[in-house]
Image (tube, helix red, strand yellow):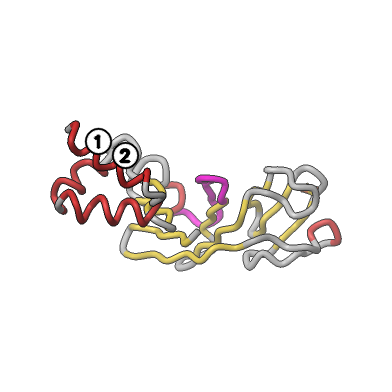
């Protein structure tokens, strides 16, 4: 355990982080060791490299199986917009930077001053005219991936 910790610290000291660190650490540790250490049963979803991985069977995200619902993960609003499609945008509004964007009645909405955005992040009124940053989503089975 100490040896692994030291190896991780050593890699960090080289300036590696995020996906690079994870990849190098996994390669150096051996795959089975890596998988065991990276599993967190209390939080089946997390940032892996530059992706958010959401298990739609986990309690925290089952609401995404219903059209019209949304969740907020790591500052990203992820909505089920149809039977087959999702949309993901930043939670930070482009109007005055409030972190108040939600999904409501088929569109993204900021309660601070009423900015409205469509599911592609395009502004629907003057307050929302600058649009929202969007993220690519991909559903694979019951796993939703959001590229961040
Ligand atoms: S900050 Fe969102 S509408 Fe003004």
Categorize mark 1 by other alpha carbons within 10 Å: few (<14), some (14-19), many (20+).
Answer: few
Residue, disc 2: 9
Categorize mark 2 by other alpha carbons within 10 Å: few (<14), some (14-19), many (20+).
Answer: few
Q: Is mark 2 within 8 Å of ligand 1?
A: no
**x then y, percent, for residue 110:** 73, 48
Q: Which mark is residue 138?
A: none
**x then y, percent, for residue 59:** 37, 40
Height in image: 4 above or below 84?
above
Instruction: Evaluate whether residue 46 shows in this view.
Output: yes
Instruction: Evaluate whether residue 17 shows in this view.
Output: no
Give the SS element for disc 2: helix
Q: Which residue occupies the extreme right position in the image?
A: 126
Q: Nearer the viewer, residue 64 or 136?
A: 136
Q: Nearer the viewer, residue 36 or 143?
A: 36
Give the SS element for disc 1: helix
Q: Which residues are magenta?
A: 65-76
Q: Give the left or right position of residue 142, taking residue 131 as reference.
A: left
- Residue 108 lies in magenta, yes or no? no
Residue, disc 1: 5
Q: Give the left or right position of residue 11, taking residue 115 as reference.
A: left
For image coordinates 55% across by 59% down, the residue present is 88
**x then y, percent, for residue 8:** 28, 42
Give the quadrant of the N terminus: top left
Height in image: 92 above or below 84?
above
Q: Is mark 1 within 8 Å of ligand 1?
A: no
- Residue 67 lies in magenta, yes or no? yes
Marks 2 & 1, CB-CB < 8 Å contact: yes
For image coordinates 63% across by 59% down, the residue present is 106
């Amino acid at each position: 355990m100490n040896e692994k910790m030291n190896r991780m610290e050593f890699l960090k000291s080289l300036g590696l982080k995020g996906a690079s660190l994870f990849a190098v650490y996994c390669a150096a540790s051996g795959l089975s060791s890596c998988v065991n250490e990276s599993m967190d049963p209390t939080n089946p979803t997390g940032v892996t490299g530059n992706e958010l991985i959401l298990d739609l069977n986990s309690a925290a995200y089952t609401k995404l199986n219903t059209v019209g619902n949304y969740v907020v993960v790591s500052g990203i609003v992820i909505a089920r917009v149809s039977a087959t499609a999702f949309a993901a945008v930043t939670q930070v509004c482009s109007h005055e930077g409030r972190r108040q964007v939600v999904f409501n009645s088929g569109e993204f909405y900021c309660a601070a001053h009423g900015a409205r955005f469509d599911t592609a992040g395009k502004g629907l009124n003057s307050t929302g005219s600058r649009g929202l940053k969007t993220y690519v989503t991909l559903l694979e089975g019951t796993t939703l991936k959001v590229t961040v």
